Amino acid sequence: MSNLLVKKMKWISVLALMCWSLQAFSQSTTDDIAKYREMIADGNPSELYEMAGEELWKKPAGPKNASLEKCNLGLGPGVVDGAAAQLPRYFKDTNQVQDLESRLMTCMETLQGISLQSIIDAKFGEGPKKEMDAIVAYVVTHSKGKKVQVSISHPQEKAMYEMGKQAFYFEAGPFDFSCASCHGSDGKRIRLQDLPNLTTREGAIAGWGSWPAYRISSGQFWTMQQRLNDCFRQQRFPFPIYGSDVTIALSMYMAKNANGGIIQTPGLKR
């Protein structure tokens, strides 16, 4: 046997061992992260946001000095139980498909007289958006344990879903990234984080069904709009406008793909 062949066989053996070690490390890391999440599952800080959100929901505010208790999230004025499980959806009064945050903005404007632009321009976690975080936590908690039931029966809902699908696969930026670059197939991860495949029902419910969530690493509650904003940042895209069609479309794409899955929001993330 030639020395060259012996060397090749040795390298093949080394590479095989490395692959096995990486696979074992990957599985071990995944298991450890799962154990970590299980340990911290009790006492989710989102509960504090939820309590603050309930107060804000019932508290008169804005130029009209009114509460949000008559806000119609799709199931009737003031009904929050199960409302988030059916969003995004088409609303006749605005003639638009809206997600939870854009719908809440409509209620804040019409019921309380609060300027939409003041909400859009605010930084995440500050001012009006900090209050939005709390209200979102309050609303989504009332859908925890329920099934995702998002419809695309209305023409605008169907169009929004198709727009979301196109946006999901759209490649741009300095690295030609898209949402699908990270979330378009199985077995991908970033750092130690497994990435759900959002094109499948199982992956979509793992992603859509666990956000909004409290992020331990930042000590903040993140709504879906903020989560999408961070995805755009990681793709090196310009930040989307808060509540814009592209963010609602991406939410519609994820939510429809997750139909039938059980909602576990507010989630708890690293």
Image: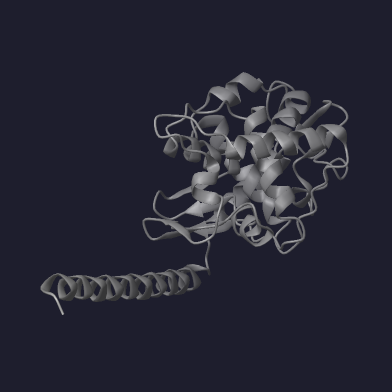
Determine the residue positioned at 59% across, 39% down.
Answer: 169
Task: Indicate whether 119 appears above or below 69.
Answer: above
- Total labels drawn: 0
Could you say which is closer to the camera, residue 160 or residue 268?
160
What residue is at 16 percent from the left and 76 percent from the top? 6
Q: Specify the farthest residue to the left.
A: 3
User: Residue 186 is drawn in which quadrant?
Assistant: bottom right
Q: Is residue 249 left or right of residue 39?
A: right
Q: Position of residue 238 (x, y in %)?
A: 47, 26
Picture coordinates of residue 99, whole percent (x, y): 71, 38
State the quadrant of the N terminus. Answer: bottom left
The answer to whether residue 162 of the structure is visible from this angle is: yes
Q: Quadrant of residue 105?
A: top right
Lateral position of residue 109 relative to residue 129, left or right = right
In the image, taking residue 3 as reference, residue 92 lies left or right, namely right
Residue 227 position, x and y percent, is: 53, 43
State which quarter of the image contains the C terminus: bottom left
**Could you tell whether 209 is left or right of 21 in the image?**
right
- Nearer the observer, 28 or 132: 28
Q: Is residue 65 visible?
A: no
Residue at 67% in and 28% down:
245
Residue appearing at x 56%, y 50% in the figure: 184
Q: Residue 172 at what x, y percent from top left?
A: 49, 30
